[in-house]
Image: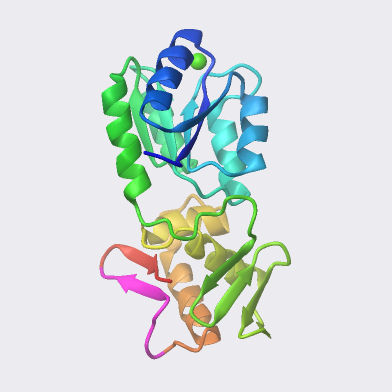
């Protein structure tokens, strides 16, 4: 796929070499980092469409890297490369915000297919570290200033409402379960407080002026919420 930029964070030279060559041959732009610290720095510098992330890395492990990046709004898909028996890692990685995983050893063709599937997801609002403003309808969410504007006029939001809106807006088109929102926005592990999420969504909708007819924050019956641009 032309014009797609891949960041591969992996410390096994064999994988870096074969995968790097294969990706380049397929027309991807590839950047390789061999440890967690420089991998995180590269991801933060922005401009990548997808991150391929080994979990067992020198310097900083892949799970911490994933958590740090997601906490700070890194929105590109993350595909974890895990050990064969890494069930616990897989669960932890998905909780930290990875989108998919592939156990080693893997066939590069399978990896390419997984990558393409992730890249096909609607991601019209990928945060690439350059433009901090997310636009939807008459609204713009300025992530640098931490404020929401409606046609240039500030909309008053409390910190939780802002956090919820930002989390939703960074993941357009994706169904977000209440439990995930509770964990990621409220930082709570207990999934039995999902009423809290519903109450805040209702509040947020009325702030957006769409309490009656939700346009941007849509309820997906029995599953959660989805943000529409
Ligand atoms: Ca490794």
Name the spot of residue 103 as percent of width and height, x first: 33, 22
Name the spot of residue 13 as percent of width and height, x first: 50, 9
Judge by depth and name the residue closer to the eye, 150 or 196: 150
Judge by depth and name the residue closer to the eye, 168 or 50: 50
Please tell me which residue is depicted at 35% across the width and 36% down the height of the picture: 115
Image quarter for residue 215? bottom left
Q: Is residue 97 above or below residue 87?
A: below
Please tell me which residue is depicted at 49% across the width and 24% down the height of the picture: 55
Q: Is residue 187 above or below residue 82?
A: below
Please tell me which residue is depicted at 42% across the width and 76% down the height of the picture: 216
The part of the chain drawn in magenta is: 212-221
Judge by depth and name the residue closer to the eye, 158 or 170: 170
Quarter of the picture holding the N terminus:
top left
Would residue 124 be seen by someone viewing this image from the given angle? yes
Judge by depth and name the residue closer to the eye, 221 or 137: 137
Would you say residue 217 sits in the magenta stretch? Answer: yes
Please tell me which residue is depicted at 57% across the width and 47% down the height of the picture: 74
Image quarter for residue 14? top left
Quarter of the picture holding the C terminus:
bottom left
Name the spot of residue 89 as percent of width and height, x first: 43, 27
């Amino acid at each position: 796929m032309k014009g797609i930029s891949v960041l591969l964070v992996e410390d096994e030279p064999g994988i870096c070499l074969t995968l790097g060559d294969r990706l380049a041959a397929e027309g991807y732009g590839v950047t390789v980092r061999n440890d967690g610290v420089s991998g995180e720095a590269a991801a933060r510098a922005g401009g990548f469409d997808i991150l391929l992330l080994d979990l067992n890395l020198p310097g900083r492990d892949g799970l911490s890297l994933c958590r740090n990046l997601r906490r700070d709004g890194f929105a590109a898909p993350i595909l974890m490369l895990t050990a064969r028996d890494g069930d616990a890692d897989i669960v932890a990685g998905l909780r930290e915000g990875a989108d998919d995983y592939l156990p080693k050893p893997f066939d590069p063709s399978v990896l390419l297919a997984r990558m393409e599937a992730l890249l096909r997801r609607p991601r019209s609002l990928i945060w690439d570290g350059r433009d901090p403003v997310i636009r939807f309808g008459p609204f713009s969410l300025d992530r640098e200033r931490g404020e929401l504007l409606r046609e240039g006029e500030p909309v008053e939001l409390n910190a939780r409402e802002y956090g919820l809106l930002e989390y939703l807006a960074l993941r357009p088109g994706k169904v977000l379960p209440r439990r995930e929102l509770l964990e990621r926005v409220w930082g709570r592990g207990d999934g039995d407080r999902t009423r809290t999420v519903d109450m805040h969504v209702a509040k947020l909708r009325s702030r957006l002026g769409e309490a009656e007819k939700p346009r941007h924050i849509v309820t997906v019956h029995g599953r959660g919420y989805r943000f529409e641009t």
